[in-house]
C-alpha cells in the first residue's frame, strides 16, 4: 500500500502580525512552535528517515556540487575526499560549506508521492507563503526555493549574505527539527555586523521557524566532533519570482 503524505499544519492560533514588528525592527525573528506539535513530530520523523542525503560543497566557481552515492561510486572515495579537502581549505579564505542536503523540490518534481514531500507541500503552500509574507511585510510572496539540510560533526557554512543573481530573494527561512541539542555542540545560526562581530545567534531547535532579511551576513558554526544529535532543518528563501510559485 502506498504511504500517504501528511498534511502538515501551521499552528492554528499563530498570528504572523505578532512577529512583523520585530522583523521590521531587527531584520530577523524566531517563531517557536510553528507547526501543530503532532505535525512537527511527524515532520521530524520524515526528515530523520531520509536515506538519500547528498554531500554538498562549492566548486572553484562557488557553484554547488552535489555528491550523491552514485557519484562516490563513480569517482571513488579518494577523489571525493580530495574535493572536500579543497572545500575545507577554501573556508579559511572565504565562502565555503560542507553538509548534507536533500533537494525537496527537485525530488518532488520527479515523484511527489513519498511522505517526506508533506514538507515540500507545506513550504510551497499558500498558507506558508502568506504567513511568511505577513511577517516580512511583503504584499505577496510568489514562491520558495527550499531544501532539507543535515549537518554532521565537522559540517559548516562560512560567512555570506545570501545575495543571488537569479532569484529575487525577499527573505531567508529555516524551519528546525533538531531535538536535544546542546549549546556546546556548535551548529548555531550566527548573524554578523560589518566588523565581523556576532550580533545574534540561534541554537538549533525543534519546531521553530526563523526568518531573516536578505542580504544579511550570517554563517553556521561548525558542528562539534562530539555532537550526538542530528541538526535537521528545512531551509530556503521566500522569493518574488513567478517561476518559483507553487503549481
Image: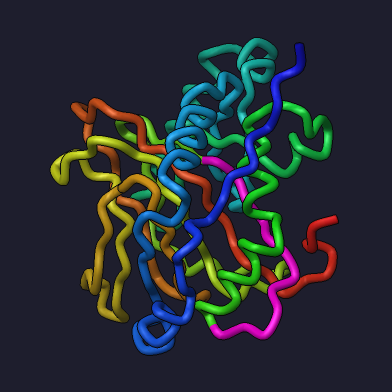
The x and y percentages for residue 205 are: 31, 47
Residue 206, image quadrant? top left
Name the residue at 45% across, 66% down.
14
Name the residue at 68% across, 32% down.
5
| Quarter containing the N terminus | top right
Residue 21, image quadrant? bottom left
Residue closer to the observer: 183 or 32: 32
The x and y percentages for residue 38 are: 44, 39
Q: Is residue 145 magenta?
A: yes
* Above or below 12: residue 100: above
The x and y percentages for residue 90 are: 43, 47
Q: Is residue 47 left or right of residue 146?
A: left
Residue 22, image quadrant? bottom left
Q: Is residue 94 visible?
A: yes
The x and y percentages for residue 57 are: 53, 40
Name the residue at 56% across, 70% down.
132
* Above or below 3: residue 126: below
Magenta segment: 137-148
Name the residue at 43% across, 32% down.
85
* Above or below 95: residue 20: below
Q: Is residue 247 magenta?
A: no
* Above or below 160: residue 51: above
Residue closer to the observer: 70 or 211: 211
Residue at the front extreme of this rendering = 13
Q: Is residue 213 left or right of residue 166?
A: left
| Quarter containing the C terminus | bottom right
Residue closer to the observer: 139 or 83: 139
Amino acid at each position: 500500500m502506498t504511504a500517504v503524505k501528511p498534511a502538515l499544519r501551521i499552528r492554528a492560533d499563530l498570528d504572523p502580525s505578532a512577529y512583523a514588528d520585530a522583523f521590521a525592527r531587527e531584520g530577523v525573528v524566531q517563531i517557536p512552535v510553528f507547526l501543530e506539535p503532532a505535525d512537527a513530530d511527524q515532520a521530524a520523523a520524515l526528515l530523520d528517515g531520509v536515506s538519500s542525503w547528498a554531500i554538498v560543497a562549492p566548486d572553484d566557481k562557488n557553484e554547488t556540487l552535489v555528491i550523491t552515492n552514485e557519484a562516490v561510486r563513480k569517482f571513488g572515495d579518494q577523489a571525493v575526499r580530495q574535493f572536500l579537502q579543497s572545500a575545507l581549505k577554501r573556508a579559511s579564505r572565504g565562502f565555503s560549506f560542507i553538509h548534507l542536503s536533500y533537494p525537496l523540490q527537485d525530488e518532488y518534481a520527479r515523484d511527489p508521492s513519498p511522505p517526506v514531500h508533506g514538507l515540500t507541500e507545506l513550504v510551497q503552500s499558500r498558507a506558508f507563503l502568506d504567513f511568511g509574507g505577513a511577517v516580512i511585510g511583503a504584499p505577496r510572496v510568489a514562491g520558495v526555493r527550499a531544501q532539507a539540510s543535515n549537518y554532521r560533526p565537522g559540517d559548516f557554512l562560512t560567512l555570506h549574505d545570501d545575495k543571488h543573481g537569479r532569484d529575487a530573494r525577499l527573505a531567508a527561512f529555516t524551519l528546525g527539527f533538531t531535538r536535544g541539542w546542546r549549546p556546546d555542540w556548535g551548529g548555531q545560526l550566527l548573524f554578523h555586523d560589518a566588523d565581523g562581530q556576532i550580533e545574534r545567534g540561534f541554537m538549533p531547535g525543534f519546531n521553530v521557524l526563523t526568518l531573516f532579511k536578505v542580504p544579511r551576513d550570517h554563517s553556521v558554526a561548525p558542528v562539534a566532533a562530539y555532537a550526538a544529535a542530528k541538526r535537521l532543518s528545512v531551509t530556503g528563501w521566500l522569493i518574488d519570482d513567478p517561476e518559483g510559485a507553487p503549481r
